[in-house]
Amino acid sequence: MSFNRIVFIVLDSCGIGEMYDAAEYGDQGSNTIGNIAKAVGGLNVPNLERLGLGKIHPLQGVSAQVEALGSYGKMAELSAGKDTTNGHWEMMGIKLDKPLPTYPDGFPRDLMDEFERRTGRKTLGNYPASGTEIIQDLGEEHMKTGSPIIYTSGDSVFQIAAHEEVIPLEELYNMCKIARELLVGEHAVGRVIARPFIGEPGNFTRTANRHDYSRDFGRTVLNEMDEAGLAVVGVGKIYDIYGGSGVNGKASTNGNMDGVEKTLEQMKQVEKGMIFTNLVDFDALYGHRNDPEGFAKSILEFDARLPEIIAAMKEDDLLILTADHGCDPTTPGTDHSREYVPLLVYGKNATGDLDLGTRSTFADLGATIAENYGLKSTALGESFLSQIVKG
Ligand SMILES: O=P(O)(O)O[C@H]1O[C@H](CO)[C@@H](O)[C@H]1O
Ligand SMILES: [Mn+2]
Ligand SMILES: [Mn+2]
């Protein structure tokens, strides 16, 4: 027996406890969902609980005394890093041995000179910052000079922030393409990101016209699926994360709840293949903003939509919920954290109440998907398909 469709949802940043090597990343004690649960006096997530969330790791307010509807476990990241890029590519079979380059002191001057020469604009910033803060700090100067704001973070990212009425979107996207061309070799960052915003000094807000330009790390299970004629529909930023490689359909979203809507819409349309959704609000609105209350509310909001997703599932559909890294909003830093990620797998025809244990790589997902569709798996990862198929 195999599953006809897979609904794969990444709860961006929802890590579930420090990994064995968290100390190397300065992330001892990080536990995104666990510390959020504590901070709000317990999480009330009956639907995630029923899927087995409380059985993965003790979480305040989430019972482990349930007969889980599906299988549950957690996964370690084998790649060096704790970034969206590493996390997602590893899920589909690629391990990144070397950490992606980061720029705690900004990007080298010669690189910036070349960027300025090719874009015809000077630049502002060029240091690690929170995106919402740096536009408040430099936005007014940007409006006066027309120079884009360049910033990075603990992630391997080159981010370009610009007011939509100062630098038109088309030009901003073109600047990102130029940056992408320049950021190669030792400076091959994971992503170049367009961060447009609108508003007046003192009251700038970012728009949904964000756009990510990922590096290509090689062939993944998504390419195998695509070439086998299976649907691979990216909802939210999935298309961008894989640079479109192997993703043959897409739906953009303007928030987590819209992401759920678009997933439900795709579930009405896709015949065979995968609906691959990333819900980024957890990360962008709450994790990086150190807002545990907001994060908790957002988890509750998602939990409340789970019954709809489950009701829309056909007999031979499979639901996979996981995350790409942590971003503990209760720790002083605002960057991602090196954590295990939860793994919840449910299907009307899949085994219930099964412990999948601690997986040694996110790539077990890619291997499972490949086996399910009879595709060549990437070398990395071990399929758990036979365990979840009802015997
Ligand atoms: O602070 P903002 O701009 O939201 O940026 C965050 O979002 C980036 C990409 O997800 C991360 O690298 C982090 O820098
Ligand atoms: Mn992420
Ligand atoms: Mn992030």
Image (spheres, rainbow, N blue to C red):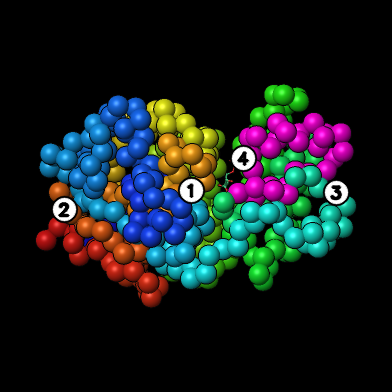
Q: Which residue is mark 3?
A: 122
Q: CA distance from mark 4 to mark 1?
A: 12 Å
SS at mark 4 in the image:
loop
Residue stretch in magenta? 126-153
Residue 47: percent from left, percent from top: 25, 35
Q: Which residue is mark 4?
A: 130
Q: Is residue 279 visible?
A: no
Q: CA distance from mark 1 to mark 2?
A: 29 Å
Left or right: 174, with 6 as reference point: right
Q: Nearer the viewer, mark 3 or mark 4?
A: 4
Q: Which residue is mark 2?
A: 354
Q: Is mark 1 within 8 Å of ligand 3?
A: yes
Name the residue located 63 percent from the left edge and 35 percent from the top edge: 132
Between the residue at mark 1 and the residue at mark 3, the CA separation in whole angstroms equals 30 Å
**Residue matched to label 1:** 336
Name the foreground residue: 27 vs 243.
27
At label 1, the amino acid type is: His
Which quadrant of the rendered structure holds the C terminus?
Answer: bottom left
Whether residue 150 appears in magenta in the rendering, the answer is yes
Front position among marks 4 and 2: 4
Left or right of 2 on screen, residue 172: right
Say if 271 sits above or below 31 in the image.
below
Q: Is mark 4 within 8 Å of ligand 1?
A: yes
Instruction: Tell which tag, 2 or 3, sits nearer the viewer.
Output: 3
The quadrant where residue 368 appears: bottom left
From this viewpoint, is residue 84 visible?
yes
Label 1: few (<14), some or many (≥20) within 10 Å? many
Q: Nearer the viewer, residue 135 or 324?
A: 135
| Residue drawn at 29 percent across, 43 percent down | 313
Question: What is the secondary structure assignment of the residue under circle 1?
Answer: loop
Q: In the rendered image, which quarter contains the N terminus?
A: bottom left
